[in-house]
Image: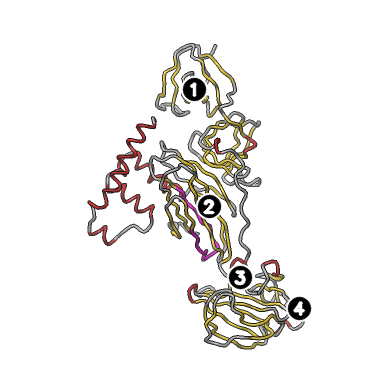
Amino acid sequence: MPTTFLSRISYVLLLLLFTACGKQQTLQGLFHQPTTPHEVYARKLQQVGLDHTALGRDWLSAAEKALHDSLVVTLPFEETGFFRAERATAASYRYAVRAGETVQVRLTLAPGTQAQIFLDAFELPIDQAAPKALASADTASFAFSYVAEDDRQHLLRVQPELLRTGRYTLRIQRAPSLGFPVLGKSDVAVGSFWGAARDQGARLHEGIDIFARRGTPVVAATEGYITRVSETPRGGKVIWLTDARHRQHLYYAHLDQQLVHPGQQVRIGDTLGLVGNTGNARTTVPHLHFGIYRAGLGAVDPYPFVRRADASPLAPRSTPLRLGHWVRVREKATDFQRSPARNASSLARLPRNTVLYVLGAQAEWFRVERPDGQVGYVPIRAVTVATDYIRQETLSAASTLLTLPQAGAPALDALPARSAVRILGEYAGYKLVQSATGLLGWLQLPLPTS
């Protein structure tokens, strides 16, 4: 589609969208306002009737499809992505989180890219319920974070407004939601983890043990109130700190000394006591037993709450020029995967010369779209740029250049006999070719060549 035509449509669309709300405020609109930028934009499409157009329907459909057909990634994660004006698309990434982890999301647009990007995080349900919205944003350069409430699969949807082309870089990392409870230590000092057997298997360890020298300060991992300072046969000298904001209680045990009193308000980093080995730990070396008890759940694994933040993920090493371009498989065959990992299951085996459209790039992987619209990952080393054409051929008969590799696809051009074409790659009985005038399109096999 010509750039000038797209520009005209974009201008009219934006004009309609940003004037519609002021003219169509209804009682229903006043009492039921959308809650996220994405919902606001979708409502504007509906208000101006664009949800009944092919372009508007495609945008809404892409948003819904992204919630149910996502790629699987491992955190920490970074990808440079590409979106194009002529198609309404949405990228979605699914990742696993643990309760207590802070998920940090940052998206930055490349210089020169002017677009509104909608970024929405969801918790995926275990049953067939709808995804639960967690956090949203829309701006040219932003970051947001949220704390995972349960061990679940989360999904991040990235969708640009209509009729925009550009690049973005997305980063997702994890960080602790609490401070570390022993001064000067980190999760490296954890020597006994959640679920370890205790008393010859009669019970399980409901916390983590952090080893440090006797007398090392034990500190508040969050702000809150001291609710109990006591001594028990199992925990020895213990302290309970209530974090009312997150409906959880922090348990410190085996202390050598307790330096706070019930009802005292503390801030993160305040000293509560000193590491020891009181209670049933008197035969072990000094350590802090640290536990977390959540309202309605009881004891939960404290490790994700205090683990070190993820290291920075590897940045994409591929040239940005590959984004928004065709590549083809150069090896005998390669796996087309839902996840960018060497041991991930394969969606399909792609034979040599299969062409793919590059939507995103990581350190060693391309996120690509097959000509049939399915999205997945392939190793960067397995493909080469399609502009380095396979060969040049001359058509012996007139042929129709198609927009898609499928029967009945719209015609892009009529190529007369004796036309020269460059063969860039193949897919499903069609060849992707470049005509003498520079048009890219599809010709059905076998080609009428001489």
| Residue 236 vertical placement versus 137 (above, below) | below
| Disc nearer the start of the sequence (3/2) | 2
Instruction: Tell me which amino acid carries mark 4.
Output: Val
Are there few (<14), some (14-19), or many (20+) residues within 10 Å of tag 2? many
Residue 430 against residue 21 in the figure, above or below: above
For residue 145, which numbered disc appears in the image? none
Lower position in the chain sequence, tag 4 or tag 3? 4
Q: Quadrant of the C terminus?
A: top right
Which circle's residue, 2 or 1, is located before the other in the chain? Answer: 2
Front-most of residues 262 and 416: 262
Marks 2 and 1 sit apart, C-alpha to C-alpha, by 36 Å
Q: Is residue 422 left or right of residue 48?
A: right
Residue ID for mark 2: 94
Mark carried by residue 285: 4
Camera-side mark, 1 or 4: 4
What numbered label is drawn on residue 302? 3
Lower position in the chain sequence, tag 1 or tag 4: 4
Relative to 413, residue 232 above or below: below
The numbered mark, 2 or 4, whose residue comes first in the sequence reads 2
Residues shaded magenta: 144-158
